[in-house]
Image (spheres, rainbow, N blue to C red):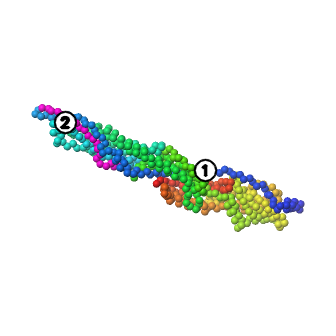
Amino acid sequence: MLFAATVLTACSDSGVDTLSEKPPISVIPYQTLLPESVVRTRLVLPLDNLSQRLEADLPQVLFEEPGKVHKKCVRIFGKKLCEDFEVSGWVQRNGPLHLQALDNGYLRIALPLRYQVKVRADGSIVRELLKGVDVKPAAFTVVVDLKPDLNRDWTLQLSSHTQIHWNEKPVIEVLGVDISITGQIDKPLNKALQIAATKFEQKLASDDRIRERARDFWERIQQPRALKGKLPLWIRAQPQGLSLSNLAIRDNALQLDLSLRTMLQTASEQSGLSTVATALPELEKLAPQASALNVNLPLTVSYEHLAELLHKQLQKRPIKLKQGGTTLTVNEVSLYPNNDRLVMAAKVSLGSFGNMMSSNGEIYISGVPVIDATQQQLKLDDVAFSRKLDSTFWSAATSLLHKQLLEQLQSSLVYDFSEQYADLQDSVNSKLLTGNSDEFSYRGQLERIDIANPQLDLEQLQIMFMLKARVDQVELY
């Protein structure tokens, strides 16, 4: 009786008993680690009218050789007469050039040429002899292989290799004199071709389209973009570098296969992403890298939203526990973080001795939020009273109902995010399979989605989806 009177006196003053001190709010700093992604990228630069541009750099006559003096002797009435004659020539075009892109990355130019001979004589005897002589030109083909390459500042350079293929024997017979022209034309022909190749190289180097396309691509991929789907999701690339995997000329276009290394930042709103674009870095020359797309997509749930869900569950299935003459009813629950645990402040009513004694108060319990990846649910683990209760009466009452109370509250706080998970999977799959826009196209495949244990922020709980996918090729229009 003395114990009951003492408790009745303590509870009758205000009708509210403070069961324990409210645990302080303490938040672990949350940082989203962005793993690096690698995307195979292709830039296509059409070489418009390449044949015409090369034709303009190759003149009709590549070079003209100065005359070389030869001697012709004949006997007339037993007397030997000798006269000098001069043989000169020039190399000229013998048809249109032919272009062929080789599998090894070279551009082959085949140019048909001919060496035309001119004979001049001052003496009457040689002039007379030449009237019946038909000096045929020597036909040959020059094959020039051009190898395009890019230096670190994205300037196109060309290296060349030249070969001469003779269609006929490179020897011309003039008045019984065999004149070999191989040694006569090799040096001046290579010089003339080098001048033409240099002009073409200078034109390509001054054509800043490669650097401009790369710079344009670099800036465009850094613009925040909204992913279409049921979930509001924005994504922005934070590129780290472009490495040249391959460079070739195909279909009258220069194609650059690149590996883009980038971080992919996500947010539920565009304002959550940075809009400061970095400048195009120097070109790196590395071996091709395998495609690997890694994206962290946070799902945020406010504590107010979780509390609303709990409130609705309490209305459908009230928590009312009885043991002996004691009745414990949970009326309302609020949530807040405390380090790595989630605290539930449960407002409860306690009745005893046929409601002759009753009181209201709060009980603070905490648990570690964990993810059930199979069911796509958020649950509480390691649930316990957050602090030792101060009130002797409440401690005694709750100790009787300890196991039941914790089990009931633990089972009540289950957040099902399977619908959001399915929406996310559908959105990403759809985006990867139909990756087309007015600026570029891409094709990819979602490989897996992992779910990390939640992190507690000051106002919300964050569940991290870690997507692993593959984007095989991005083509810039």
Q: Main secondary structure of the magenta part?
A: strand
Q: How many marks?
A: 2
Residue 393 sits inside the magenta stretch: no
The circle on residue 122 is 2
Most foreground residue, 380 or 331: 331
Could you tell which of marks 1 and 2 lies nearer the N-terminus?
1
Q: Position of residue 224 (x, y in %)?
A: 56, 54
Q: Return the mark for residue 399.
A: none
Front: mark 1 or 2: 2
Q: Which residue is mark 1?
A: 33
**Residue 169 visible within the image:** no
Amino acid on which disc 1 is placed = Leu
Which residue sits at x=53%, y=46%?
279
Residue sitting farthest toward the top: 79
Few, some or many residues within 10 Å of mark 1 (<14, 14–19, 20+): few
- The residues colored magenta run 79-99
